[in-house]
Amino acid sequence: MNTEEHNAKIVEQFSKQAIPFTKLSGHLDSIEILKEMAELTPEDNVLDIACGPGLVLCEFAKTAIHGTGIDITQVMLEQAQERQKNLGLTNMKWDLGNVTELPYSSNSFSLVITRYSFHHFLEPKKVLSEMYRVCKPNGRILIADVVLSKEKVNAFNEMEVIRDNSHTKALTFEEFEELLSFFELTNLKRASYKVEMELERQLSASFPKEGDDEKLRQIFKNDLTENNLGVESHLIGNEIHFSYPISVYVGRK
């Protein structure tokens, strides 16, 4: 698949997901962990790439001097602008654009962040290269995303592509370490947390192909005993619950 086709899938999916995404429990959780890991200060000029509906950047902008969000999906940016307005934040701007070619000068931001985006990128190394370029010397880069073991990642990726066809692949721990070491980021820190989900609520906020919701239910039913996906599938009453395993990486340029 070429970049143009893949970007069209992202825009199609997230134009549909824009409103339900903001309402899913778990997507506002753990932002304090990100702020702490990023060592956020009132002097920070923050860039959030693939910012979506602005959930993370609006929280960062409550502390930072300025926040800029960029995303490829206009409907997501409209949600972000509405959130900013409701919170009364005036130190923010939102740009429509592709994160593989950021429209910003080199060494522009003291803090460059992204959350839940790397598994959508066809060229994660190219994206990180752009994040590195626009980050100021001694600035920080933060990435938070699903990361899995080599033993679980293939089954997880097969499931996620069915749920969201803009998913490319979750990286393994080894792949992330190799990616970060290539750019020689210093003072690397890593943390982790889990995003708890109930399957039916997640499906209601997703837009798989017709009939694929039943495939997904069966995959998770099987996972209750097989534990192939790496998401700790389990029952609470009659409901299937699971947890996305999130890793947070922060390093200095």
Image (cartoon, helix red, strand yellow):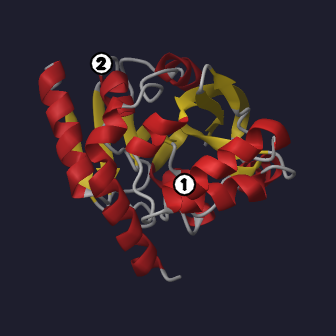
Quadrant of the image occupied by residue 242: top right
Whether residue 145 is visible here, answered yes or no, is yes
Residue 124, percent from left and from top: 59, 61
Nearer to me, 178 or 170:
170
Q: Tag 1's secondary structure?
A: helix
Q: Amino acid at mark 1?
A: Glu
Name the residue: 15% across, 34% down: 82
> Which residue bears the numbered disc 2?
62
Position of residue 230 in the picture relative to residue 158 (left or right): right
91 or 107, which is in the foreground? 91
Q: Secondary structure at mark 2?
A: loop
Q: Residue furthest front?
A: 238
Q: Nearer the viewer, residue 216 or 32?
A: 216
Q: Relative to residue 239, is residue 19 depicted above or below? A: below
Give the residue at x 50% y 50%.
117
The dot on residue 214 is 1
Q: Mark 2 Cα within 10 Å, few/some/many (few <14, many 20+)?
A: some
Residue type, numbered disc 2: Lys
Q: Is residue 230 visible?
A: no
Residue 57's x, y, as percent?
Answer: 35, 32
Q: Residue at coordinates 38% horizontally, 41% vertically from top-left?
A: 47
Say above or below: 69 vs 1.
Answer: above
- Residue 138 lies left or right of residue 58; in this view the side is right
The image shows residue 65, relative to residue 51, as above or below, that is above
Residue 244: x and y in percent read 63, 36
Q: Nearer the viewer, mark 1 or mark 2?
A: 1
* Quarter containing the C terminus: top right
Give residue 11's mark.
none
- Hey, which quadrant is residue 103 in on the image? bottom left
Whichever of labels 1 and 2 marks the residue nearer the N terminus, that label is: 2
Distance CA(mark 1)–CA(mark 2) = 42 Å
Left or right of 11, for residue 90: left
